Image (cartoon, grey):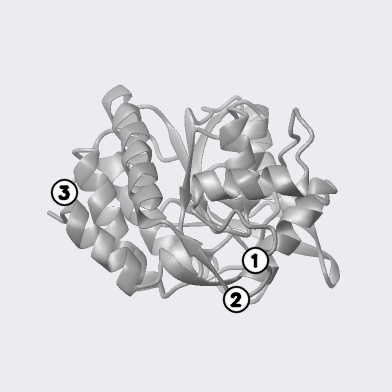
Amino acid sequence: MLSTGALRAHLLAARLAGPVATPRETSLRSYRLFAARDPRVMLGLDPDRVWGERDLLRLMADKCGVSADPDHVSGLDVIDPERTLAALDAFAERLAGVAERRAPVLFGTGHPHRLLGFYAGLADALSAAGCAVLTPAQGRCVDITTRFGVRTYNLDYVRGVALVREPGVRAPGSATGAHTHSPLPVRAVLEAAVDARGVLPELVVGDHGWVCGAGQLGIEAIGLADTDDPALFVGEAEGRVSVAVPLDDGVQADHYRPLARYVLNRACLSQ
């Protein structure tokens, strides 16, 4: 068992919280783009209200613990570990509820190089608890706009976790994929499930467009988000995202394993 104190110490030592590697300039740029409703940072979310830059800064200070001072424009951002721990507890509660109902769940990540192992551990535990871990639309092509133009990607699943990869780059089933913020993959997955008259997830677990895209369509969604991902926290504030966990989403993959152990223990799903 990993105590709250031990996890707090790990969050700080691994720089998952506390001073993180995300530059303040990057976060502020994301808030400016979100205020302008730039699709690159909306992640599939269509907010009900108008969010100005100052509104977003106040929200992110409340949700993540970043500085609320608009004159603080450089250096590294800071995430309050207490907010991360509280969000992880809420995240675990949602997983426990799904496990109790043995409800179907979908996992997806736009950060496969970093977060695949975290989600895969959760998927294994929910599957063992009797939940259907869904894998619709495997192999389907998705056209995603990138800074290099429109690129075609293939949907794939690794240990029950959806990701996208460029065709021919890696064999299906390999544990790496492409980094993406797009909501198009989760839309393609849900569309395929509907077309096949299959089961829809009661919960989507992931990051970036997987969470916001699902939440925008009315499916409960929980996920991880960095200080430059305001869409998940806006979604949480507006009720479309159930839980957004503030943490650095770009550290070494093995640093997320203690978080998975903590969440599974809190959800009474440790194997």
Indicate the secondary structure of the residue bearing disc 2: loop
Q: Is residue 202 visible?
A: yes
Task: Give the vertical position of 186 relative to 171 (above or below).
Answer: above
The amino acid sitting under disc 3 is: Gln
User: Few, some or many C-alpha atoms within 10 Å of disc 2 (few <14, some 14-19, many ≥20)?
Assistant: few
Residue at x-position 65% and y-position 50%: 57
Front residue of 214 and 259: 259
Locate residue 54, reporting x and y percent: 72, 47
Residue 243 in picture, x, y percent from top left: 47, 38
Label pair 1/2, CB-CB below 8 angstroms: yes
What crowding class fits label 1: few (fewer than 14 Cα within 10 Å), some (14-19), or many (20 or more)?
few
Left or right: residue 160 compared with residue 239: left
On the image, the x and y values in percent for residue 78 come to: 49, 64
Q: At x 27% / y 60%, what residue is drawn?
A: 8
The residue under label 2 is 75
Real-space CA distance between mark 1 and mark 3, rounded to the nearest whole angstrom: 45 Å
Q: Residue at x 50, y 31 (%)?
A: 201
Identified by mark 1, the residue type is: His
Q: Which mark is residue 72?
A: 1
Q: Position of residue 104 (x, y in %)?
A: 42, 31
Compared to residue 11, the image places residue 204 above or below, namely above
Query: Which element is circle 3 on?
Result: loop
CA gap, disc 3 to disc 2?
41 Å
Query: Marks 1 and 3: which is nearer the front?
Result: 1
The amino acid type, in three-letter code, at marker 2 is: Gly
Choose the circle earlier in sequence order: 1 or 3.
1
Q: Badge 3: few (under 14), some or many (20 or more) residues near its Cα, within 10 Å?
A: few
Q: Which residue is mark 3?
A: 271
